[in-house]
Image (cartoon, grey):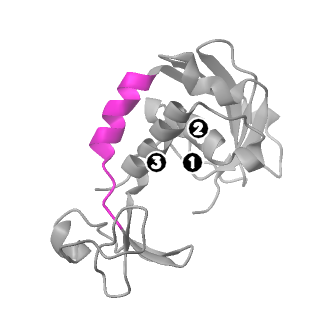
Amino acid sequence: MTDIFNVFIEACDGTTLTGLLQYRSPDGYGFSEAPEFGLQLIMDAWDRRSQSGAGSVSAATEAEFKELFELYLGREVNVDEEGYLLEDGSTNLRVPRVKAEEFYKGRLHPYGGMGISNGIHFVQLAPQPAEFAQRTTEIIVSFEISEDDPAEDDEDKGPSARFTTEVSDPRYLEHLAKGTSFTTAFTGHLPFA
């Protein structure tokens, strides 16, 4: 995915996070006001922690972030070269043998998400945008964004906007105890199922 925004996050305060978004090119297409955008930015800061300088999270929060990414992007399921399912966390064939397309009939990624990761083949399940949206309502209390004055925009960069996100539990912001910056391809939109 192509990164669209530069993200600058200020240190969080309890359950509130503030920051700035800036288009990476002079062409700007507006800013999503969807609460999903707030969650996407929080998740992506954690996922890009080597780039962003974000801190670590608890094991429970890490597991939840991984699950949220799977809901948004679609879970990767390991298979052999012929498409037979492997046991979870193993390179052994699942018993009884079954092809992923049969086992996950109607649930595979509609655009054929497949590949190889760390030498192991995988197929991707379809995103679950409704479930991601539901989880967003449980995590994001509010998300507000306001575009900066276009007269103040940098010529080489695109429009910018300030945002404030409030979460239901401070653990969702524990990796953002200090200011961070990173780039993101998230836009606030939900994937197609």
Q: Where does the magenta region start and end?
A: 124-139
Residue 41 numbered tag: 2
Residue lying at 57% horizontally and 63% vertically, measured from the top left: 1
Looking at the rendered structure, the kind of residue marked 3 is: Phe
Q: Compare marks 1 and 3 and give the one earlier in the sequence.
A: 1
Residue 183 numbered tag: none
Please state the horizontal and vertical placement of residue 21, each as a whole percent of the image.
68, 37
Q: Compare marks 3 and 2 and give the one earlier in the sequence.
A: 2
Q: Count residues near mark 1 (Cα–Cα under 10 Å), then give few for <14, some for 14-19, many for 20+.
A: few
Quadrant of the rendered image containing residue 7:
top right
Is 96 drawn above or below residue 181 in the view shown? Answer: below
Please state the horizontal and vertical placement of residue 33, each as a whole percent of the image.
48, 31
| Circle 2 SS class | helix
Is 31 placed left or right of 152 in the picture? left
Tell me the distance, in whole angstroms, between the alpha carbons under discs 3 and 2.
12 Å
Q: Is residue 129 magenta?
A: yes
